[in-house]
C-alpha cells in the first residue's frame, strides 16, 4: 500500500493521525498538523494457537470494514480472520481534552474451537524534528 494514500483521519486541535482502509496507522503529527511526522511504521498482529504471525492489516484471510462512530472522531476498523473465525475490533481516536492518541483492541472468538491469541505490536518512530535519522 502506498504510504501517501490516507483513507481515514482522526485528530484534535494539535494532533493528526492518518490510516489506511485496513486500519494501519500511516502518520502521526504533533504538536502541529503541518509538520513533525513521528511514526515510521506501526504494525499489529496476532498469533493464534501458535500460528505464524498474522498481520492485522495485511493477511489474505482478513476481511475489513471501517467506519466512524456517528458525529465523532472515533475510527473503528473491524478485522475478521476467516481462517480462525476471529473478529478483531480496532478503535482509534484522539482525546479532545489531552494530546493523546488512544488505540483499543477487542478480540472475539466467533468459532467453536478455543483460541489462544497472542497480540503483538511492532513500531518505529522518527524522533527528530526533521526526521533525518530513522530508528
Image (cartoon, rainbow, N blue to C red):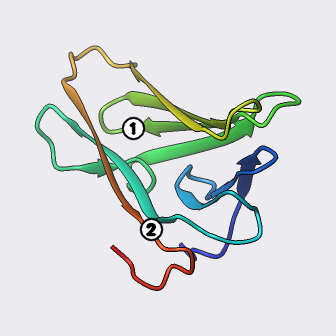
Q: Point out the residue furthest to the right here.
A: 71
Pick the residue in front: 80 or 6. Answer: 6
Pick the residue in front: 33 or 53. Answer: 33
With respect to residue 104, does 25 lie above or below?
below
**Residue 11 horizontal side relative to residue 120, left or right:** right
N-terminal-most mark, 1 or 2: 1
Q: Of helix, strand and loop, which one carries label 2? A: loop
Q: Residue at x 22, y 22 (%)?
A: 115
Quadrant in the rendering for residue 27: bottom right
Looking at the rendered structure, the number of numbered marks drawn on it comes to 2
Image coordinates of residue 42 in percent, x first then y, are 43, 57
Q: Residue at x 56, y 44 (%)?
A: 64
For label 2, the crowd category at 10 Å Cα-Cα, with few meaning under 14, some 14 to 19 and many 20 or more, is some
Image coordinates of residue 66 in percent, x first then y, are 66, 42
Q: Residue at x 40, y 19 (%)?
A: 110
Residue pointed to by mark 2: 127
For label 1, the crowd category at 10 Å Cα-Cα, with few meaning under 14, some 14 to 19 and many 20 or more, is some
With respect to residue 4, does 7 lie above or below?
above
Q: Which mark is residue 12?
A: none
Pick the residue in front: 92 or 106. Answer: 92
Q: Of helix, strand and loop, which one carries label 1? A: loop
With respect to residue 36, does 77 lie above or below?
above
User: Alpha carbon of mark 1 to alpha carbon of mark 2: how far?
Assistant: 38 Å
Residue pointed to by mark 1: 82
**Residue 110 horizontal side relative to residue 17, left or right:** left
Between disc 1 and disc 2, the foreground one is 2
With respect to residue 91, does 36 lie above or below?
below
Pick the residue in front: 18 or 22. Answer: 18
Image coordinates of residue 58 in percent, x first then y, are 42, 58
Q: Quadrant of the C terminus?
A: bottom left
Quadrant in the rendering for residue 118: top left
Q: Residue at x 14, y 31 (%)?
A: 49
Amino acid at each position: 500500500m502506498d504510504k501517501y494514500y490516507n483513507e481515514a483521519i482522526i485528530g484534535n486541535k494539535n494532533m493528526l493521525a492518518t490510516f489506511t482502509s485496513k486500519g494501519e496507522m500511516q502518520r502521526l503529527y504533533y504538536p502541529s498538523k503541518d509538520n513533525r511526522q513521528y511514526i515510521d511504521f506501526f504494525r499489529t498482529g496476532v498469533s493464534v494457537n501458535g500460528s505464524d504471525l498474522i498481520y492485522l492489516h495485511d493477511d489474505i484471510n482478513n476481511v475489513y470494514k471501517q467506519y466512524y462512530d456517528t458525529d465523532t472522531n472515533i475510527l473503528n476498523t473491524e478485522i475478521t480472520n476467516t481462517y480462525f473465525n476471529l473478529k478483531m475490533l480496532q478503535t482509534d481516536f484522539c482525546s479532545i481534552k489531552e494530546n493523546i492518541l488512544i488505540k483499543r483492541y477487542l478480540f472475539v472468538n466467533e468459532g467453536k474451537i478455543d483460541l489462544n491469541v497472542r497480540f503483538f505490536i511492532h513500531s518505529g518512530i522518527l524522533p527528530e524534528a526533521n526526521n533525518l535519522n530513522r530508528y
